[in-house]
Amino acid sequence: MFYEQSSQETDNFEKNKQLSLEPFCLTLSKHGLVLTRGKTQTLQVNVGFLCNQECRHCHLSCGPGHTEIMQPQTIKDVIAFAQRSRFEAIDITGGAPELNPHIADMIEGLSPLAPRIMLRSNLSALNVAKRDDLMDLLESRRVAIVASFPSLNPAQADSQRGDGSFLSSIDALRKLNALGYGQEGSDLKLNLVSNPTGAFLPPSQVQTEKRFRQVLEEKWGIVFNNLFNFANVRLGRYRQWLKQSGNFETYMEKLVSNFNPCSVDGVMCRSLISVSWEGYLFDCDFNLARGLYLGGRKMHISQMAGPPEAGSPIAVADHCFTCTAGAGFT
């Protein structure tokens, strides 16, 4: 396990001492746990921070006007890395990956290289960009959609993601259903991700999925495959909101007090490697947001012969409490 004590982390440590909270690395040690890699099965690609929304819960502070976008040469480097590594899944994320002007080339290049390709979408970007052509490409390449859909309440969803985002998301879900996504018997997977709209941990995933499935089908005729219910990570814009609203300390206390040692074995960083829009490697998208490089060393994807070996160290910091609270973040 690698632990980098940056100046920001030192500040966090001092605040944690005042709150009587111990750093994540010490919590692991206290429970006799060591966080290292298993087999790296998933390549996660962050294609940039450009987004049509400025979501309150975003750990990367993505939004309109961002110029951090993965360029064609880096996309070629990512495709070459996938060719020599042979991952079981490739997870394309952002920002809103739909807004990267080179996203079609990436999907075309990556789709033959892994059994499962996923695109993370905020749904409204498919409408804002008028990307019916992209939907058709996703359908033809059998790309699974992992769609952010935080709330069934339009006012709550719009307060978190921006005015009009709820109805735009509903429209996108209907279009995806019309293509076969989420339909029974179809191999086109449509999974939803729900994040709490405030400073609290998510409720039961089973109950949330049941409620979403019932309401979406009854009100809008929308179907989907699975729903995943995750806590918000206290980085980026969500961190700013926690501080401005006076909820930072109490939210951190909730995460720490709900630490679940059984969740450590299944955290995503044990089986995933993340690449930034610039092509640098991280253990996960949260470490990317935090600036903690893979194994504590800045390395470009073009320099990596293959996936990290099992047993390799994982960089950790106090934001890792999010992934190990309650049912965990897998």
Image: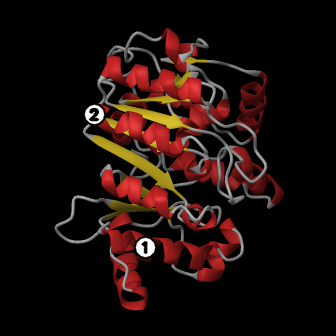
Count of all numbered marks drawn on residues in the image? 2
Residue found at x 56% / y 64%: 196
Mark 1, secondary structure of its residue: helix
In the image, 319: left or right of 203? right
In the image, 304: left or right of 265? right
Q: Is residue 44 above or below residue 259?
A: above
Q: Which residue is mark 2?
A: 88
Q: Which one is in front in this view, the residue at disc 2 or the one at disc 1? A: 1
* Mark positioned earlier in the residue sequence (2 or 1): 2
Number of the label disc, if any, that sits on residue 175: 1
User: What amino acid type is highlighted by mark number 2?
Assistant: Glu
Single out the residue that lies furthest toward the bottom: 219
Mark 2, secondary structure of its residue: loop
- Image coordinates for residue 210, horizontal then vertical, percent: 33, 76
User: What amino acid type is highlighted by mark number 1?
Assistant: Lys
In the image, 44: left or right of 288? left
Q: Nearer the viewer, residue 119 or 269?
A: 119
Q: Nearer the viewer, residue 11 or 313?
A: 313
- Image coordinates for residue 112, horizontal then vertical, percent: 29, 35
Residue found at x 64% / y 38%: 21
